[in-house]
Image: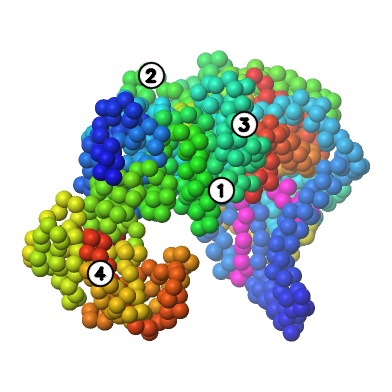
Amino acid sequence: MIKKALLGAGIAALLAGTALSAQAETLRLLTWGGYAPDKVVKMFEKETGIKVKVTKSNNEEMIAKLRATGGGGFDLAQPSQDRITGAQAEYNIYKPIDLGRIKKELFIPSMLEATKKNTTLNGKVYGVPHVWGTSGLVVNRDKAPDVKDYLDLCNPKYKGRVSYRLKRPTLIAFAFSMGMDPFAAYSDKAKYGEILKKVEAKLIECKPNVKAYWTGGDALLNLLRSGEVWAAMAWDTGGWKLNKENPAITFVAPKSGALGWIDTFALPRKTKAEDAAYKWINFVMQPKIAAMITAAAGNFTASKGADAYVEEGLKKRFQESFPQEAIDNIKWYPPVPPGLEEMEGKVLDRVKAAK
Amino acid sequence: MAADETLVGSVCGTKETTACDLECRGVTKRFGSFVAVGDVSFTVPRGSFFSILGPSGCGKTTLLRMIAGFLQPDAGDILIKGRSVLDEPPNRRPVNMVFQHLALFPMMDVAGNIAYGLRRRGVPSAEIVRKVEDALERVGLPGYGAKRISQLSGGQKQRVAIARAMVLEPDVLLLDEPLGALDLKLREHMKVELKKLQNRFGTTFVYITHDQGEALVMSDQVAVMNRGRFEQVGPPPALYYRPQTPFVAGFVGDTNRWRGKVLTADATGVKVSTDSGLTLLAVSAAGMSPSAGDEVDVFVRPEAIALSRDEAGLGTLDNRMGGEVVSLLFNGANSRVLVREKNSGGEVDVTLPQAGEMHELKPGAHVHFGWRADQALCFPASGGDEA
Amino acid sequence: MSARTKLSLILLFAPFALWLGVLIIIPHIDMFLVSIREKIGIGQYRIGPANYMAFFTEPLYWNTFMRTALMSIAATLLTFLIGFPVAFYIAKVARGRLKTTLFLMVLLPFWVSELVRTFGWMILLRETGVISHTLQWLGLVHRPVELLYNDGAIMVGLVYTSMLFMVVPLVTTLDSLDDELIEAGYDLGGNGWSVLREIVIPHAMPGIVSGSIVVFMLSLGNYLTPVLMGGKNSLWFTEQIYQQFIVRFNWEQGAAFGFLLLFLSSLIVWLGLKITGQTLRETMG
């Protein structure tokens, strides 16, 4: 009697489960904050009838999440272009993109080509570009007028008034600023190790200048806003956001080059809504929609013609931070070969432990 | 007998032979407007067993806690061996206490409990060991030192608590109803035991209880306390046979009580007409001189009442009446008969004689009973002091 | 036992068994299997103890753990020293409404999330924060003071976060201490200190032990407080585990660290119990 009832309940639950999943097509999107604003999601849902479930994350967590499920749990992810092939080679979490299903005419051609090249593994393309931006310096020009490059953060004048993250972009940035080319050494672990060793020494030397290694973007903005920190290595959008409140603070493209990143669209290997994923990509790359995402995220997209719809103030701030030569000097992240993160991690640990 | 009472009332040190360990002078304690202890004075002679008997809420615990030092009196003085101890905190007073729930330290073994006070005094450890063994010996628990408190029976805990306090050789040992938690049989046994221990140690005991049985059996002197005041202080027989207040008469021992009005009163006795319609002959309690018309209470002990099958058996007793047996309350030597008086309808408690004709008495039987006038004590009617 | 009662018994225990099995035992077995995997190339692994060895051969990891453990012990001690008088006051001195109010006040910080609490402290302690401003306004200091980003700030955060878990078991055990025992302690010649040491503390020992274990484990496992409030030199073992799992993609190392944390913290608790002569059974019973 009881067994029968249990069985019945079990079947009912199963049926309910399938019913639920069949009810509406859902796109589970693993992305960054600001890349899927509510307004855009609503428009997409209205147009296609596909529900969008947004999970906000970052590069490392995206890989960790997909790795834990072998590429399941999400239908579309947005890792940075340099973090795709390494993760794919090691954990096999992505599915190649069918470029035929992408409306190529919506993309800025050079950016599409670059991303395709950087996300190709064994002849297959795993990513198409979406949002791009840079990291460089956010500087309070009243208090630290002569911070022009990453190494200037180590100027003793600014003791205790500087902040950066203890993460790989900092290592790369300092290497460039010290006149080395870490990207060129990506394929040569020994050489890369040499570079890291020098950067490590510099970062330890620079430690007295650091007020705190920042971990969250909002916390950093607060430090800059309150004047507790005068110069920091951070994303361009943070600098422009503060610039709106306080003209003295802005994003400065460092002399040795801002670090350029492109966040992509990539298909998790076990995606269950491939159609919806392509529909989403082609939807958000429309110039008007892309401009809405730029407004929300603060960064520009790879959508061709979207600039026309972007708010003037943002464009102005961009142009102020990026004269043409600064744009030309942007160091775009090449794909990270597997194994580098571990070397970098040990360096970062030692920097943090150093007194 | 009268000499006893003057001795209690005597001031310490007036006679060299009656030095006393504890003296309270006009001790008063108020909680807000409530007077918990009001102007209480008494002395306790050295080596005696002094009980404070009273119903719960009478202030006896407050008084004891003032002596121990946990409360500070609002007025009056407390002297131990003739020296005021008001300025001494509890840990310095030469008194120790056996608490109501004994308060043995469960985190220590028996020896640890007894040694606690000695350690606090800085007694050398070899001496502590010796004293602890000695104390255990004296309370009849030799070799129990290593036992946990939880392994002891109720009576053994009792003795450990006493040993723990006595090992400090206090001038006065205070006991706060320590037998209350024991079952009846053990309580009866411990009464005797406590008295023996007190004799053996020769220490002054101040014992508070609401159980008159405990107080009467163990004490040299008993103070009956009510509403923050001492009603009467004296040796147990004096309290029992010659109560000085209606409260004492009602509270100490069992008693029958009638309320009524004085018809006539003279040196030989008092004639009272009770509210229930009886006319009783009684004597006035010491120090009272009621006059006609006064409202009075008449107290008669059950054992003072003679019981007989026929009227002739009562002889010439001053008060004689008849009635019907309502019930028999068998309790061995303390058996009672409840008789309904035929004229007033009131019930009277009578002790059942152990020998003779009465042991076949059945409910419904007609009996005659009576008592002498001098066994009926007459007090001015008090308020609502039901004991 | 009839088949029916047997079945209902099985059903009754099923959620617990399921919880234990699915959420505790199986993940730990899996974690252990991951932790003994040595990475030798891209997607290539072999079984071996290298991940565990790394902990002992790389001083950084070992130091990080020691630092975490010592700070956690210090936080536990500090929480006890602050929490005990509070608990004693709530259990033995305060009466009626005051007691409830005080207890609620201890509870109050836990009505918001740990993140919010930590940010609250950051607002207080930072250079442009409330305390810094107050000190300047009082004229005690003449320039902003930075109270955040150091080990003291971590300690403040840890103690604050743990207070409830120390106070509640202490209040419970102290509540059960008969006032008579304290009075007896005084009556027999003890003073405040000896009564505390010989009667109150031994009685409260189960509460102290359980409170300390919980606080120690919470501090050791805390992630947000050390990361957000700690200084630039601050290393915390859970941060290291997070780094290994999430940032370095080194699950093998992270899993090994997880197990080491489990064993080493259990070892410390066991040592603590040994040193103070307590047993876990007494504490739980």
Q: Determine the residue positioned at 47% across, 68% down.
A: B331
Residue holding disc 2: C141
Numbered marks: total: 4
Check disc 4 and give the amino acid type.
Answer: Leu
The quarter of the displayed image where residue C236 is located: top right
Q: Nearer the viewer, mark 2 or mark 3?
A: 3
Tag shown at residue B317: 4
**Kind of residue at disc 1:** Gly
Q: Secondary structure at mark 3?
A: helix
Q: Is residue B22 visible?
A: yes
Position of C86 with respect to A167 (left or right) is left
Q: Residue at x 54, y 42 (%)?
A: B159
CA gap, disc 3 and disc 4: 60 Å
**Image spot of residue C110 (x, y percent):** 49, 47
Same chain for the residues under marks 4 and 2 in the image: no
Do callouts 1 and 3 point to residues on the same chain?
Answer: yes
| Mark in the foreground, 3 or 4 | 4
Helix, strand or loop for disc 1: helix
Q: For the residues marked 4 and 2, what is the alpha-carbon distance in whole angstroms?
A: 100 Å
Confirm whether the magenta stretch covers residue B296.
no
Q: In the image, residue C75 lies at what x, y percent?
A: 57, 32
Label 2: element kind: loop
On the same chain, marks 2 and 1? The answer is no
Chain for numbered disc 1 = B
- Span shown in magenta: A47-70
**Amino acid residing under circle 2:** Val
Q: Residue at x 50, y 48 (%)?
A: B192
Callout 3 crowding tier (Cα within 10 Å): few <14, some 14–19, many ≥20 = many
Q: Nearer the viewer, mark 4 or mark 2?
A: 4
